[in-house]
Image (cartoon, helix red, strand yellow):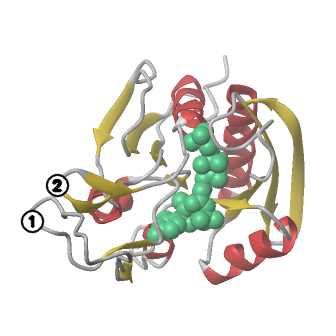
């Protein structure tokens, strides 16, 4: 009988949002629920892979057989990923990582004062996790990104594929409530060098199985 598509492979996945602290009680974040990344972890585990899931704060149960690593900030996610990336055959960056964090986190709760009607927060760039994985020269995993866009989906996604040196990018239009962030559904167009595949709107778990199958096929082609 045939082995499952990813047996013997290690898959490292990021999921969910990150939280960037402002002070002990406040943070910057986004609307990612983690559902897409958790669906990918479930699909990869069903395909026979060893799966490590690095996730920001979400309200989801860990899929069966998946090793879960909980983090909060982009910097923590970066550390957790870089510790494991070289041992992985496949990296999938599905997390909605905050591009910026607050430059100086206040040690105490920031107070509202009667004299200050405006408050300015200075933000600094976070490390680009997926770009750092894709830039590994020694034991670089097959690297799959996501692109969340509200316009110019194809162009922005293809630009990220090139710029971040990814093997595959899954573009989702996040301008509609019917798919993308938080929804049970998604619609994706996957792009790679010289090809693309459109996956119409369907439950995230079916999208995940299709993406895992596509990745498994690409890995087999690479080996031949
Ligand atoms: O979590 P859900 O509610 O199920 O929603 C799923 C989703 C919409 C969050 C998901 O499908 C998705 O699109 N995830 C990527 C969101 C995102 O941040 O996209 P981006 O275009 O800003 O980033 C591009 C790629 O770079 C992504 O693979 C991202 O993980 C990665 N990145 C971005 C910034 C950064 N500092 N480090 C990164 O690794």
Q: Is residue 194 above or below residue 59?
A: below
Q: Position of residue 76 (x, y in %)?
A: 26, 59
Does any atom of ligand 1 lie closer than 8 Å to the CB of label 2? no
User: Which one is nearer the viewer's eye here, 47 or 76?
Assistant: 76
Say few, some or many: other residues with alpha carbon within 10 Å of mark 2 (under 14 / 14 to 19 / 20 or more): few
Q: Is residue 133 visible?
A: no
Determine the residue located farthest toward the left in the rendered image. Answer: 107
Under circle 2, the secondary element is: loop
In the image, 30 versus 207, the foreground residue is 30
The secondary structure type at the circle numbered 1 is: loop
Question: What is the quadrant of residue 138 in the picture?
Answer: bottom left
Quadrant of res 54: top left
Q: Which residue appears at 40% of the width and 24% of the height?
A: 62
| The image quadrant in which ligand 1 is located | bottom right
Q: Is residue 31 among what the camera can see?
A: yes
Relative height, residue 213 to residue 27 (above, below) = above
Residue at image location 83% in from the left, 67% down from the top: 151
Position of the C terminus, as image quadrant, is bottom right
Residue 140 drawn at (x, y percent): 46, 68
- Real-space CA distance between mark 1 and mark 2, rounded to the nearest whole angstrom: 7 Å
User: Is the C-beta of the residue carrying label 1 under 8 Å from the nearest atom of ligand 1?
Assistant: no
Residue drawn at 38 percent across, 77 percent down? 118
Q: Is residue 38 above or below residue 126?
A: above
As drawn, the label of residue 35 is: none
Q: Which residue is mark 2?
A: 24
The answer to whether 29 appears left or right of 173 in the picture is left
CB atoms of marks 1 and 2 within 8 Å = yes
From the viewer's perspective, tell me whether residue 223 is left or right of residue 126. Answer: right
Q: Position of residue 68 (x, y in %)?
A: 33, 34
CA neighbours of label 1 inside 10 A, class few (<14), some (14 to 19), many (20+): few
Q: Is the N terminus in the top left, top right, bottom left or bottom right quadrant?
A: top right
| Circle number at residue 107 | 1
């Amino acid at each position: 009988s045939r082995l499952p598509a990813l047996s013997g492979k290690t898959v490292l996945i990021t999921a969910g949002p990150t939280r960037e602290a402002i002070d002990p009680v406040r943070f910057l974040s986004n609307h990612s629920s983690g559902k897409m990344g958790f669906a990918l972890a479930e699909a990869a585990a069903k395909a026979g892979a060893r799966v490590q899931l690095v996730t920001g704060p979400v309200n989801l149960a860990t899929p069966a057989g998946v090793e879960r690593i909980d983090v909060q900030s982009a910097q923590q996610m970066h550390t957790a990923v870089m510790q494991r990336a070289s041992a992985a055959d496949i990296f999938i960056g599905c997390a909605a990582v905050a591009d910026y964090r607050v430059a100086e986190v206040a040690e105490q709760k920031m107070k509202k004062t009667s004299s200050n009607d405006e408050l300015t927060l200075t933000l600094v760039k976070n490390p680009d996790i997926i770009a750092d994985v894709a830039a590994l020269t020694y034991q670089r995993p097959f690297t799959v990104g996501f692109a969340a866009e509200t316009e110019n989906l194809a162009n922005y996604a293809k630009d990220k594929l090139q710029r971040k040196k990814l093997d595959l990018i899954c573009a989702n239009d996040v301008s509609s409530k019917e798919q993308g962030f938080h929804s049970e559904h998604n619609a994706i167009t996957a792009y790679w060098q010289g090809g693309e595949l459109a996956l119409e709107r369907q439950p995230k778990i079916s999208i995940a199985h299709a993406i895992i199958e596509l990745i498994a096929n690409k890995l087999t082609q690479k080996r031949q």
